[in-house]
Image: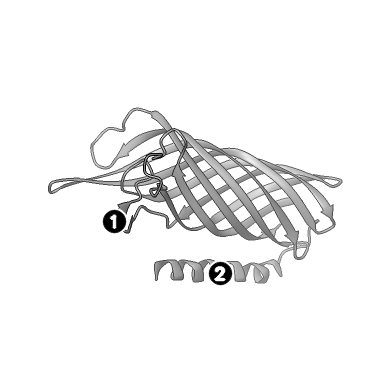
Amino acid sequence: MKKILVCLAAGAAMASVPAMAQDVAPVEPFSGFHVEGLVGYDVSKAGSSIDDDVNEDNDQSIDGLLYGVGAGYDFRSGNLVFGPEAEVTWSTAKTSFEDGDFEGFGLGNVKTNRDLYVGARLGYAVSPRTLVYAKGGYTNAKFDVNNAVGTVETNRDIDADGWRIGAGVEQAISNNVFAKLEYRYSNYEKGELDYTGDFPDGDRFDLDLDRHQVVAGVGVRF
């Protein structure tokens, strides 16, 4: 039910974008400032250095619905488009038991929290209304960890730093409104434990987490 409500909320937000654009002055496609709503599929899994190769049935992955918002500014020179972008997203992915097998994904009992991204993209307008692009940058993700020893429950976050690359296609529906579809891969190589309460944060440690996402977006240019 939670996933259904999130989908409906995201769909309603995206459906309102064309209505908002009616009051925006026309701009050239693929240029200027833009904001967008995002929704898609998100899967995180243990990387090659911590994957459970002994038990082939344990893929150690978690997946779920991704949703969030993004913004950016595109500079256009002829058919070449480039500019900075940023976003914040969340995901419903969390660990689970499947047929008695715990899908621990290398970190224990976790669920995804917010994911921040700052980067840039470079694209080429293959037609007046179609842009293909590649992207890359820095990503910081949090994973909520739930541990219990006896009757004592410890809540903490893993604050993970990494990099992201991706590629996609953007279609101008009008001069102001656009839709896009992209694939992104992220790898988190460093992390630290952020404890709740008065506990100090832990030292940074090495990670190897892979994240794959397929994301659709609808946005408005100003």
SS for tag 1? Answer: loop
The spot of residue 210 in percent (x, y) is 49, 41
The quarter of the picture where residue 97 lies is bottom left
Tell me residue 95's x, y (percent).
Answer: 35, 52
Q: Earlier in the sequence, mark 1 or mark 2?
A: 2
Depth check: 69 or 96 in front?
A: 96
Q: Residue at x 59, y 47 (%)?
A: 184
Residue linked to disc 1: 100
Q: Is residue 215 visible?
A: yes
Q: What is the quadrant of the C terminus in the image?
A: bottom right
Rendered view: 119 above or below 8: above
State the mark number for residue 11: 2
Query: Crowding at label 2, few (<14), some or many (≥20) Cα neighbours within 10 Å?
Result: some
Amino acid carrying label 1: it is Gly
What kind of residue is marked 2?
Answer: Gly
Q: Are the residues tagged 1 and 2 within 8 Å (C-beta)? A: no
Q: Position of residue 218 (x, y in %)?
A: 64, 62
Q: Which residue is rendered at x = 12% and y = 49% of the image? A: 151
- Viewer-nearest residue: 46 or 193: 46
Element on which disc 2 rests: helix
User: Distance between the Cα atoms at labels 1 and 2?
Assistant: 35 Å
Which residue is depicted at the point 56% across and 67% down?
A: 13
Residue at x-position 38% and y-position 28%? 204
Q: Nearer the viewer, residue 74 or 133?
A: 133
Q: Position of residue 58 (x, y in %)?
A: 38, 48
Q: Residues within 10 Å of mark 1 (few under 14, many from 20)?
A: few
